[in-house]
Image (cartoon, helix red, strand yellow):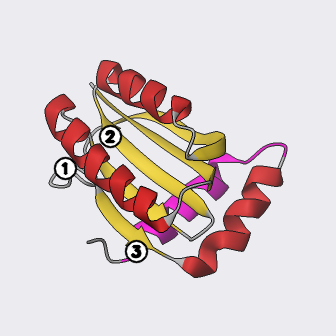
Amino acid sequence: MERRVFYISRSLATPEQTEQILVGARLRNQRSGVSGALLFTGGHFAQLLEGSPQALATTMAVIEADPRHEALTRLIESDIEQRRFADWTMAYMESPGADELIEQLLASPAISTERAERILTLMLETSPR
């Protein structure tokens, strides 16, 4: 069984640290069999991760302990039948215009699964590199 986790957080990272995050994530994900996509808005991160439940638990523990971001909020955690990013250890996208949207989400007391799915779909429509 495969799972996915989609979360958002407020970035505390410099541009150089963001590049280090991306490089490190790609190496760790390759070793652990995790795939996914990272969106950086300039002030926030949105990330989709896919993999085995054990690999995702380990990966999320590392991410949650990372001091280069704060206010991590998990929007979706669910089983999946097929990965969206099976060929990517970590796709990367930038979308400075999404900063305000993610800040609003972080301030929301509860986010519906439907709204989180719409945000995820918008994120995935951006061309990864």
Q: CA distance from mark 2 to mark 3?
A: 17 Å
Q: Main secondary structure of the magenta part?
A: helix
Q: Are marks 1 and 2 in contact (CB under 8 Å)?
A: yes
Span colored in magenta: 109-126
For this view, does 88 lie left or right of residue 59?
A: left
Q: Residues within 10 Å of mark 2 (few under 14, many from 20)?
A: many
Kind of residue sitting beneath label 1: Ala
User: In front: 33, or 43?
Assistant: 43
Residue 86 is tagged as 1
Which residue in the structure is indicated by mark 3? 125
Task: Tell me the quarter of the image containing the C terminus.
Answer: bottom left
Which residue in the structure is indicated by mark 2? 50
* Residue 116 % position (x, y): 61, 53
On screen, residue 65 above or below 6: above
Q: Residues within 10 Å of mark 1 (few under 14, many from 20)?
A: some
Kind of residue sitting beneath label 3: Glu
Q: Secondary structure at mark 1?
A: loop
For this view, does 113 lie left or right of residue 61?
A: right
* Residue 103 % position (x, y): 74, 61
User: Which is nearer the N-term, disc 1 or disc 3?
Assistant: 1
* Residue 20 % position (x, y): 35, 54
Q: CA distance from mark 1 to mark 3?
A: 16 Å
Confirm whether the magenta stretch covers residue 28: no
Task: Tell me the quarter of the image containing the N terminus.
Answer: top left
Q: CA distance from mark 1 to mark 2?
A: 8 Å
On screen, residue 66 above or below 93: above
User: In front: 102, or 122?
Assistant: 102
User: Which is nearer the N-term, disc 2 or disc 3?
Assistant: 2
Kind of residue sitting beneath label 2: Glu
Residue 103 is tagged as none
Q: Are marks 1 and 3 in contact (CB under 8 Å)?
A: no
